[in-house]
Image: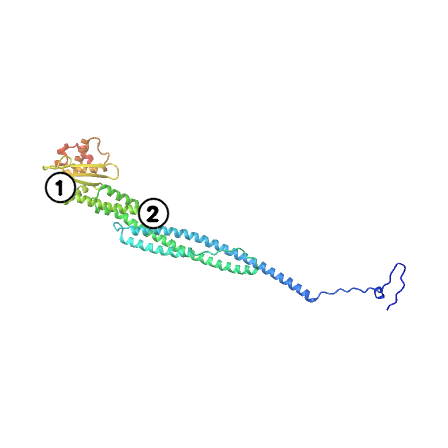
Amino acid sequence: MTPLTAPDPGGHLLPAHLAGPVPTARRRRPRRGVVLALLGALIVVGGLGGLQLTASLGYDDSRAQFAQALDTAEGRAAEIRRTTDELISITDAASQLVELDSGMLTDPQTKEQLAASVASASETTSTTGELLDEDLPDAEAKPVTFWDLFAASTALRTDAEVLERLDTELADESPALDAASSDLMESGLAFLGSAADAAAPFEAAHISAKNDDVIALRNAAASVSEVTALDEGSVSSFTALQDAAAQVVTSENAELAEKAGPLQGVRLEVEAFARSLAPGVLIEFDWSPVVNGAGYGGSMGGLTTWWWDEPDRALIELSDSVAAQWPAERSRALVAHEVGHAISVKCEGMYDASTQDSIEKWATAWAIGMGFSDDANGVSAYGYPPQSYIDAALACR
């Protein structure tokens, strides 16, 4: 036991080992493993940060490439859709023309060509429509983690390639659409032109039709000849032309039915003679037993109504006795007198049309000028016309 030393007054004793010198403290160095772990963690964090940055920038580039491809494809699709819609509209009109055609006026070859153009255009729009119906890819919201960013970037690049391919395919359709539209328009206008051109010979082949129906045919043909595009308007014009042609046939059949009987052939011969004296004037004829108070007992009657407005036209009424006595000179002279009235529509202003006497003397003078000297030319009924009338009438042909 360690002996204790007597303490100073007011103090206390301590054991010797507590009272001895204080030992010096030592610092321990960090362990190598901890340092390496920290360094590794820093490296991993730095690497992950680099991956995240790289993935984010890569995504942005892919997104920009995708956006550009999408804008281009959408613009191309809008352009091709407009062109396709226009072609579909033209095709619909052309198809209606083919379906409505009765063959009354159109040329069979032009109709066949139009039908072929319709089929070709329909095939073209069908092919283009399939491309336009493809769903365009869309980009979702930007991911957060680098692994999702890398995956999304790959998907965006793939989608961009799809859009670029679609844009190329749509661009390739443009020439086909233009060619189909041009071919269809050319075939359609040729088809309509053939119908308009056929109106005149059709009219000539149905010479006995009523004037109003012939005029309607002419107007309808003129409307069709002015068509420059295939649309609803062209279909309406063609329909009106066909209806007018059908009415001409109906009108002629009705007129011929009225003229049926023993004198029909002679009546038509008289009408043809009258028309030959006044080319360019539309003349229709009505026949009755009595006209203008004459027709029985060997007498002949005639009456003409004409219109000064366009087109030149007139209605000549003749008694059946004119046909019964045909081709006697007196019958021919009377017809010439009536044609003198009818043709005055071409010679307005060449004589005084204010009095009935002047009007009758003009027609008589015209018949005389045409070489018909029988008194049935008007002389027997209205007297001999002044030489001045004959001279003026010679200029009216």
Foreground: 330 or 245?
245
Foreground: 182 or 147?
147
Colour scheme of this structure image? rainbow
Residue 174 screen position, x and y as percent: 40, 54
Residue 339 screen position, x and y as percent: 18, 38
Callout 2 crowding tier (Cα within 10 Å): few <14, some 14–19, many ≥20: some
On the question of residue 397 being in view, the answer is no
Residue 220 screen position, x and y as percent: 28, 44
Apparent side of residue 346 relative to residue 51 in the rendered image (left or right): left
**Mark 2 vs 1, N-terminal side:** 2
The residue beneath circle 1 is: 323
Which mark is on residue 232? 2
Residue with the most extreme left position? 297
Name the residue at 21% across, 38% down. 314
Quarter occupied by the C terminus:
top left
Which amino acid, mark 2?
Glu
* Count of residue discs: 2
